[in-house]
Amino acid sequence: MAEKTFTTTELKQFDGQNGQPAYVAVAGVVYDVTAKGGWRGGQHHGVHAGTDATAAIEHSPHGAAKLKDLPVVGKLVD
């Protein structure tokens, strides 16, 4: 199966609101954070789902360590 690609505009649709799944991009990889309790309502410590969260992850206390447990849904292409 071909890997799904997302533009920034497409990624915005996956904001965790109104029944949508919550996705975030980090370093070009798109992760599904929907099932993570800390992402209820599409937000986690001021970071919004549907966005490129690379800078926020780089400055978070846990860094990218938590990403390894998340499902990868595709790549960000722009």
Image (spheres, rainbow, N blue to C red):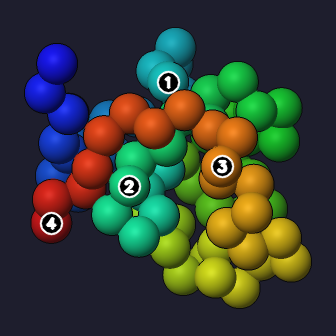
Which of pointers 2 and 3 indicates the residue nearer the eye? 3
| Residue that numbered label 4 is attached to | 78
Compared to residue 45, the image places residue 1 above or below, namely above
- Of the numbered discs 2 and 1, the one sitting upstream in the chain is 1
Residue found at x 17% / y 42%: 5
| Residue that numbered label 3 is attached to | 68
How far apart marks 2 and 1 lie (CA) works out to: 16 Å
Which of pointers 1 and 3 indicates the residue nearer the eye? 3
Camera sees residue 41: yes
Decide which of 34, 71 is in the foreground and name it.
Answer: 71
Helix, strand or loop under label 2: strand
- Of the numbered discs 2 and 4, the one sitting upstream in the chain is 2
Amino acid tagged 3: Lys
Residue 45, horizontal then vertical, whole percent? 79, 62
* Quadrant housing residue 65: bottom right
Helix, strand or loop under label 1: loop
Which of pointers 2 and 4 indicates the residue nearer the eye? 2
- Of the numbered discs 1 and 3, the one sitting upstream in the chain is 1
How far apart marks 1 and 3 lie (CA) works out to: 19 Å
How far apart marks 4 and 1 lie (CA) works out to: 20 Å
Residue 38, horizontal then vertical, whole percent? 83, 42
- Of the numbered discs 2 and 3, the one sitting upstream in the chain is 2
Residue found at x 13% / y 27%: 2
How far apart marks 2 and 3 lie (CA) works out to: 11 Å
* Quadrant housing residue 29: bottom left
- Of the numbered discs 3 and 4, the one sitting upstream in the chain is 3
Residue found at x 75% / y 54%: 66
- Quarter occupied by the N terminus: top left
Amino acid tagged 1: Pro
| Residue that numbered label 2 is attached to | 29
Compared to residue 44, the image places residue 59 above or below, namely below
